[in-house]
């Protein structure tokens, strides 16, 4: 998989921008503050529907504009795919795949990338919310179905917390009668997330050790483990039959659900007293170790940075191994400046085998020698040169494949390709939809209730993570009215999962039943994506949204 062309309008500092990329290494170079990171931010947005720099989409829209347009043409599994996003300053975002309207989060099913950015250091040295965000973004990259499960879980936590708060106002009897219903929904979605996280940690551990050894040329025994609030609430690892990751990931859903139910019963009194949900994946943490010591507090800056990079290298290796559509696109944003010469070379060697690598740098001296780069120079916020090897770039004037039957339309808004589909420029945008789903960090829909209970959270943080799996929660409004509301549980290829399919089952089949369609299959017949098959998602708007800690601070 690789990005062939990126087109932007009113995105960040760019009124317009057109950039072509080639397979192999691509270098975006220019002084700081000129817009290099804005370009790779736009690319990465397609794989997770969130920015690694800000918690809401509004800053992505250029000052004075009401919406930003990002178009990206991919080459994956031998096919061309056109992805388009309209990022609105207010209201829900819009999306198209090959000019067919889809829900924005479905774009993530077509494109995968792994970004190495300076902010990754917060995974290691920051609060638990950053580590939860990493886990949940990795789940979505690995299994797109995770976006719907995470969105459902956040909605349940939000509703359950609202109910707990009402108990403090004198309606405790009614709350206690209703709470068991929400408990079961919390357990159903929460156990899926917990099992999927356990499998992810198990599968990342080997590649993490390999990546760390390749980067630092030493074996410091990097390790991963989960600190789960369900076990903490019971004051015993009742769901951990052994301490091995293999057995931990194989604990049955029934066993974990039983533990979850017991943990909720254990903390019921405190939850009613304080109006917060104290148990669940939104209270868990990822523990990182080097030589059996916590990285946070013990590791040096260099060791912490190497661990963060190795974690991303492990994720890239896992996605590459599992994806039939090819390697994820590797993005390195000003990373080499943080490394010594030896680690620069080893990192470049580790990622050079991927189909496409996009690197930003302020000066040539930061870039390792060796690869033949395609260079894209930026100055004063404009692309001043675009040169380098591009023999295998797409021929833009040639007849497109059946998977991409038209060039990207020009203009300020996306253009409809099918009769009966609402025009993205003129359709109602539901200005309240985004507010209902939360304008702050996407875990903050479940963070508000935990703010009051912060001292009881071992992490001091709450929420699924700052992203709350952005692919599912922000701007996820359908363009088509005649849809099935249950499609939030769409499978890997945008189809509903088969009977019994759950996020926690590993691996999610991609070729055993007609219901399980891989990304490769989608690419064989990309035009089959029909907006009429996609649902309008209104649960978050109906449920309401709790403000993020940043919003609460702003009000104060």
Image (cartoon, rainbow, N blue to C red):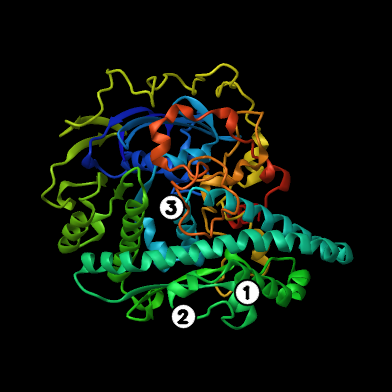
Q: Residues within 10 Å of mark 2 (few under 14, many from 20)?
A: few
Q: Is residue 6 visible?
A: no
Tag of residue 455: 1
Q: Nearer the viewer, residue 203 or 357?
A: 203
Q: Pick the quarter of the image with the N terminus.
A: top left
Foreground disc of the pair 3, 1: 3
Q: Is residue 375 above or below residue 252?
A: above
The residue furthest left is 370
How far is the residue under mark 1 from the one under mark 2?
Answer: 28 Å
Give the spatial CA distance, label 3 vs label 1: 33 Å
Residue drawn at x 51%, y 69% is 285
Badge 1 element: helix
C-alpha separation, residue under disc 2 versus residue under disc 3: 25 Å
Q: Residue at x 31, y 74 (%)?
A: 300
> Residue 121's x, y, as percent?
37, 62
Assign a secondary structure to mark 2: loop
Q: Which of the numbered marks, if any, corresponds to residue 243? A: 2
Q: Which residue has dot 3 on it?
A: 142
Report whether 366 appears left or right of 273.
Answer: left
The secondary element bearing badge 3 is classed as helix
Q: Quadrant of residue 297?
A: bottom left
Residue 379 in view in this figure: yes
Other-residue count near label 3 (Cα within 10 Å), few / some / many at <14 / 14–19 / ≥20: many
């Amino acid at each position: 998989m690789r990005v062939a062309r990126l087109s932007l309008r009113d995105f960040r500092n760019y009124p317009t921008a057109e950039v072509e990329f080639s397979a192999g290494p691509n270098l975006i170079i220019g002084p700081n503050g000129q817009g290099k990171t804005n370009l790779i931010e736009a690319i990465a947005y397609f794989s997770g529907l969130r920015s690694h720099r800000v918690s809401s989409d509004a800053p992505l829209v250029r000052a004075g504009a009401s919406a930003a347009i990002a178009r990206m043409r991919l080459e994956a599994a031998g096919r061309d795919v056109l992805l388009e996003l309209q990022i609105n300053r207010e209201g829900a975002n819009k999306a198209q795949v090959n000019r067919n309207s889809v829900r924005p989060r479905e774009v993530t099913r077509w494109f995968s990338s792994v970004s190495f950015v300076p902010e990754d250091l917060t995974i290691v040295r920051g609060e638990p919310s950053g580590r939860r965000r990493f886990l949940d973004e990795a789940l979505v990259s690995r299994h797109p179905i995770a976006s719907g499960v995470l969105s459902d879980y956040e909605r349940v936590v939000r509703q359950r917390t609202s109910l707990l708060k009402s108990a403090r106002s004198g309606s405790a009897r009614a709350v206690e009668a209703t709470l068991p219903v929400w408990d079961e929904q919390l357990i159903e979605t929460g156990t899926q997330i917990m099992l999927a996280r356990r499998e992810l940690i198990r599968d990342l551990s080997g590649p993490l050790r390999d990546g760390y050894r390749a980067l630092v040329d030493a074996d410091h025994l990097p390790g991963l483990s989960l600190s789960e609030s369900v076990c903490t609430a019971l004051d015993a690892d009742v769901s951990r039959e052994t301490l091995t990751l293999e057995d931990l990931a194989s604990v049955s859903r029934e066993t974990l659900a039983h533990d979850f139910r017991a943990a909720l019963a254990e903390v019921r009194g405190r939850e009613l007293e304080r109006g917060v949900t104290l148990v669940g994946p939104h209270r868990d943490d990822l523990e990182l170790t080097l030589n059996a010591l916590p990285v946070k507090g013990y590791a040096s800056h260099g060791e912490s940075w190497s661990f963060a990079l190795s974690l991303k290298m492990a994720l890239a290796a896992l996605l590459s191994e599992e994806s039939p559509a090819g390697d994820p696109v590797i993005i390195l944003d000003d990373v080499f400046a943080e490394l010594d010469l030896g680690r620069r070379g080893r990192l470049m060697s580790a990622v050079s085998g991927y189909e496409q690598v996009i690197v930003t740098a302020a000066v040539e001296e930061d870039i390792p020698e060796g690869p033949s780069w395609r260079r894209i120079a930026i100055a004063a916020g404009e692309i001043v040169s675009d040169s380098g090897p591009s023999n295998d770039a797409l021929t833009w004037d040639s007849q497109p494949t059946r998977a991409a039957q038209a060039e990207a339309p020009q203009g300020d808004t996306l253009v409809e390709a099918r009769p009966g589909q609402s025009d993205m420029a003129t359709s109602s945008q539901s200005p309240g939809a985004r507010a209902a789903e939360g304008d702050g960090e996407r875990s903050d829909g479940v963070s508000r209730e935990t703010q009051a209970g912060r001292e009881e959270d071992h992490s001091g943080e709450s929420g699924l993570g700052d992203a709350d799996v952005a692919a599912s929660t922000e701007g996820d409004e359908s363009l088509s009215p005649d849809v099935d509301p249950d499609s939030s549980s769409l499978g890997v290829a945008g189809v509903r999962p088969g009977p019994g399919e759950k996020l926690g089952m590993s691996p999610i089949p991609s070729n055993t039943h007609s219901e399980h369609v891989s990304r490769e299959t989608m690419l064989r017949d990309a035009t089959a994506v029909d907006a009429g098959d996609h649902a309008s998602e209104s649960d978050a708007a109906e449920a309401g949204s709790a403000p993020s800690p940043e919003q609460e601070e702003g009000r104060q």
